[in-house]
Image (spheres, rainbow, N blue to C red):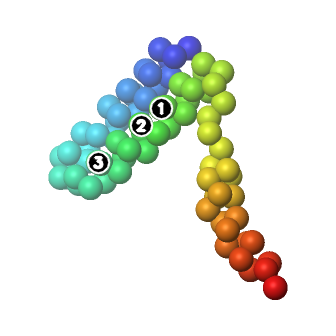
Amino acid sequence: MIVLAFLAFLFIMAIEVPGLVKKKMWRELIAFAVFLWIGMSLSILQILGVEPPSPIKFIEALYKPLAEWLKAP
């Protein structure tokens, strides 16, 4: 199953990357590579049955002090 996911991401790269390189869209290529890497990593983790980290925990940790400060009399 991991091989199929990897092949799917290779197929996506084969379609998108040549056009970005030909048009010399280097920033877009870097952004594409970053998002593709994140997507591939999360897909492989899901295939392996590993629960990916929840972004809600990070958001709660970030805003909890602010919420407590606003609640204080």
| Disc 3, SS | helix
Q: Residue furthest front?
A: 73
Front tag of 2 and 3: 2
| Disc 2, SS | helix
Residue 59 location, x and y as percent? 64, 58
Residue 27 location, x and y as percent? 26, 55
Q: Residue at x 50, y 37 (%)?
A: 39
**Disc with the residue nearer the chain's start (2 vs 3):** 3
Question: What amino acid type is highlighted by mark number 2?
Answer: Trp
Q: Are circles 2 and 1 on residues that touch, CB within 8 Å?
A: yes
Is residue 28 shown left or right of residue 60? left
Dot 3 surroundings within 10 Å: few (below 14), some, or many (20 or more)? some
Query: Measured along the vertical axis of the image, is residue 50 above or below residue 16?
Result: above
Q: Where the N terminus falls, by quadrant?
A: top right
Residue 38 location, x and y as percent? 47, 39
Q: Residue at x 69, y 58 (%)?
A: 60
Residue at mark 1: 40
Query: Measured along the vertical axis of the image, is residue 69 above or below residue 58?
Result: below
Q: Where the C terminus falls, by quadrant?
A: bottom right
Q: Residue at x 48, y 32 (%)?
A: 40
Question: What amino acid type is highlighted by mark number 1?
Answer: Met
Is residue 22 shown left or right of residue 29? left
Q: Where, by quadrant of the figure, is residue 61 drawn?
A: bottom right
Dot 2 surroundings within 10 Å: few (below 14), some, or many (20 or more)? few
Residue at mark 2 to residue at mark 3: CA–CA distance: 12 Å
Residue at mark 2: 37
The label shown at residue 29 is 3
**Disc with the residue nearer the chain's start (1 vs 3):** 3
Residue at mark 2 to residue at mark 1: CA–CA distance: 5 Å
Q: Residue furthest bottom?
A: 73
| Disc 1, SS | helix
